[in-house]
């Protein structure tokens, strides 16, 4: 096809244009286009599909329609051996074949032909037709055309109407002209150089310049005599004119520069977005470090909280000692001699709930203070960073509810840990051995007292009064020893029990320390959960930026490759075509 290299280059540039501005929509720039820039962009976009306009003029039956059909290699114009006089026909691309008046003396003819997407053809009435209205319209369109093909019939190339028509046109019209000696197949081969020389001489005399001139026989194009038709030389010259057109090349260079500027704007936008995301990520990291510092500080201050737990434990031990003292009173101890000993079990059942309740109270109080502190911290974060990060933080009430649930889980965790720690103290086993030893001694004294009383009763019945009195006195002494033994051993048991538990206070705190630290970590993990939505938002935005940068790199490489195709020059030498 004529101008194949130019149109291939322009098509590549058009695809690059579409790709770059499709990318621009994905990452819109903050600076909106001005009215002038928008108009310029619209004009450039139109330039990427603007066809070349070829204007054909000559005498009636000079072979103009045959030439246009030969150039298009399709039947665009009707060829009739009889003279055809009528309006100017402007052949354009269209989805349907139709004709409609465009302006006075001009008819627009559309057809779905690929050639017409690249070239628009203006077929004029003969210069010797005498139709002044049509010839005036033709002259106007010829001045706007990109190429002018002037047809001279080989039978009479010196016809005055055509030369008169050319002499009335401005110099720019003649600069675009190509002289074609048509229907050369009707003359002898030896006559052709002579006729071409005559045309050049006459052109110099009438016009003051000599446009390129070719001898053709358009009717032979597409036949077995195609090589002798001269169309190949004409097509090569047209392709060269198209390829070296300064106006069109500068238009492509301007479009290339416009695309480059758009790519720079996209790059700045993507970089700015990446920097913004990085900044937001740093701010989020700072927030998370603040939360980690709060957790670390709380863990460092756990000595105070665990010290409170130790005080609770010691308080529980004192209560346990008082309870045990009451449970080991003399009358209760003597009463239990006649039934199973269950003091150790009862004491443990009373002591353990008291310790757990006191521990939950202390832990819950510490957590309430921590919740209030975290809520104040979260409130300051919302007011300080909501505008910077650009994402809505969750409300403080939501954070408070979540931390309250976390605190409840923390207290339950500590309760279970405390129950295990208390069980590991083996209160029942320690008490049970001491109480059984005390019960054995008291049983022995009580049995002796009962035996003496029984013997005293038998002696009195037999009349041995002095013996009976002696045995009763011995029974009284044994009872006194029984009471003394109960009181003495009770004190020893209570003191040993209390001292043992007090010495195990550190072991108790150490046993629950791990659960306390894990509970605090879980608490602060739940506190930082409010940042997950922000982190997820930033991760999604960051992931969306990478494909944009990849696509930008692809478009940039395409842009660099286009520089060689369009013959790149410095942007300061670029100018927009006058039609813009």
Image: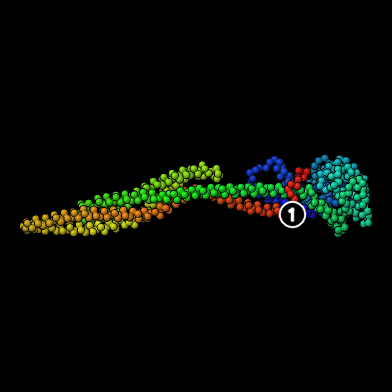
Residue 452, visible in the rendered structure? yes
Residue lying at the far left in this picture: please name it. 463
Residue 336, visible in the rendered structure? no
Q: Residue at x 39, y 54 (%)?
A: 513
Q: Residue at x 62, y 53 (%)?
A: 547
The C terminus is located in which quarter? top right
| Residue marked by disc 1 | 564
Q: Within 10 Å of the Cα at label 1, are there few (<14), some (14-19), or many (20+) other Cα atoms?
A: few
Q: Residue at x 52, y 49 (%)?
A: 285
Res. 485 image quadrant: bottom left
Q: How is the image coloured?
A: rainbow
Q: Secondary structure at mark 1?
A: helix
The N terminus is located in which quarter? bottom right
Residue 74: image x %, image y %?
Answer: 81, 53
Question: What is the tally of numbered marks visible in this picture?
Answer: 1
Q: Residue at x 23, y 59 (%)?
A: 437
- Name above or below for residue 506 compared with residue 38: below
Give the left or right position of residue 536, taking residue 268 as reference. left
Foreground: 34 or 91? 34
Foreground: 533 or 560? 560
Res. 164 image quadrant: top right
């Amino acid at each position: 096809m004529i101008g194949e290299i130019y149109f291939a280059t322009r098509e590549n540039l058009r695809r690059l244009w579409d790709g770059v501005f499709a990318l621009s929509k994905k990452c819109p720039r903050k600076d909106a286009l001005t009215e002038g820039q928008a108009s310029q962009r619209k004009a450039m976009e139109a330039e990427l599909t603007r066809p070349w306009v070829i204007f054909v003029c000559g005498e009636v039956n000079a072979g103009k329609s045959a030439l246009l059909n030969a150039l298009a290699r399709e039947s665009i114009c009707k060829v009739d051996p009889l003279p055809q006089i009528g309006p100017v026909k402007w052949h354009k691309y269209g989805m349907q074949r139709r004709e409609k008046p465009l302006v006075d003396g001009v008819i627009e003819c559309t057809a779905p032909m690929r050639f017409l997407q690249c070239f628009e053809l203006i077929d004029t009435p003969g210069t010797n037709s005498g139709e002044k209205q049509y010839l005036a319209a033709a002259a106007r369109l010829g001045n706007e055309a990109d190429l002018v093909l002037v047809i001279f019939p080989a039978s009479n190339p010196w016809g005055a109407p055509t030369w008169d028509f050319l002499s009335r046109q401005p110099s720019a019209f003649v600069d675009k002209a190509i002289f074609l000696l048509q229907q050369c197949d009707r003359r002898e081969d030896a006559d052709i150089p002579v006729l071409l020389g005559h045309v050049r001489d006459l052109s110099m005399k009438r016009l003051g310049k000599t446009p390129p001139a070719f001898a053709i026989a358009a009717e032979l194009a597409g036949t077995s005599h195609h090589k002798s038709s001269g169309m190949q030389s004409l097509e090569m010259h047209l392709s060269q004119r198209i390829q070296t057109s300064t106006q069109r090349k500068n238009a492509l260079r301007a479009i290339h520069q416009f695309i480059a500027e758009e790519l720079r704007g996209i790059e700045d936008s993507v970089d700015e977005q990446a920097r913004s995301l990085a900044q937001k990520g740093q701010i989020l990291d700072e927030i998370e470090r603040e939360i980690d510092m709060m957790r670390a500080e709380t863990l460092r201050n756990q000595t105070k909280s665990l010290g409170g737990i130790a005080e609770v434990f010691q308080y529980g031990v004192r209560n346990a000692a008082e309870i045990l003292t009451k449970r080991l009173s003399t009358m209760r101890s003597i009463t239990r001699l006649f039934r199973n000993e269950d003091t150790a079990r009862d004491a443990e059942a009373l002591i353990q709930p008291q310790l757990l309740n006191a521990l939950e109270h202390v832990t819950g109080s510490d957590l309430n203070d921590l919740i209030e502190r975290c809520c104040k911290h979260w409130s300051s974060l919302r007011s300080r960073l909501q505008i910077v990060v650009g994402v809505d933080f969750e409300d403080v009430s939501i954070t408070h509810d979540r931390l309250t649930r976390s605190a409840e889980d923390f207290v339950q965790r500590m309760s279970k840990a405390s129950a295990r720690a208390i069980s590991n103290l083996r209160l029942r086993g320690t008490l049970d051995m001491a109480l059984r030893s005390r019960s054995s001694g008291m049983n022995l004294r009580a049995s002796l007292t009962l035996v003496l009383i029984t013997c005293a009763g038998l002696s009195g019945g037999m009349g041995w009064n002095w013996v009976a009195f002696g045995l009763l006195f011995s029974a009284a002494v044994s009872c006194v020893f029984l009471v003394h033994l109960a009181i003495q051993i009770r004190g020893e048991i209570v003191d040993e029990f209390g001292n043992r538990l007090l010495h195990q206070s550190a072991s108790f705190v150490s046993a629950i320390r791990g659960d306390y630290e894990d509970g605090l970590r879980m608490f602060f993990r739940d506190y930082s959960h409010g940042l997950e939505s922000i982190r997820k938002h930033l991760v999604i935005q960051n992931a969306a930026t990478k494909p944009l940068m990849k696509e930008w790199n692809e478009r940039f490489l395409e842009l660099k490759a286009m520089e060689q195709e369009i013959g790149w020059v410095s942007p300061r030498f670029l100018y927009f075509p006058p039609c813009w």
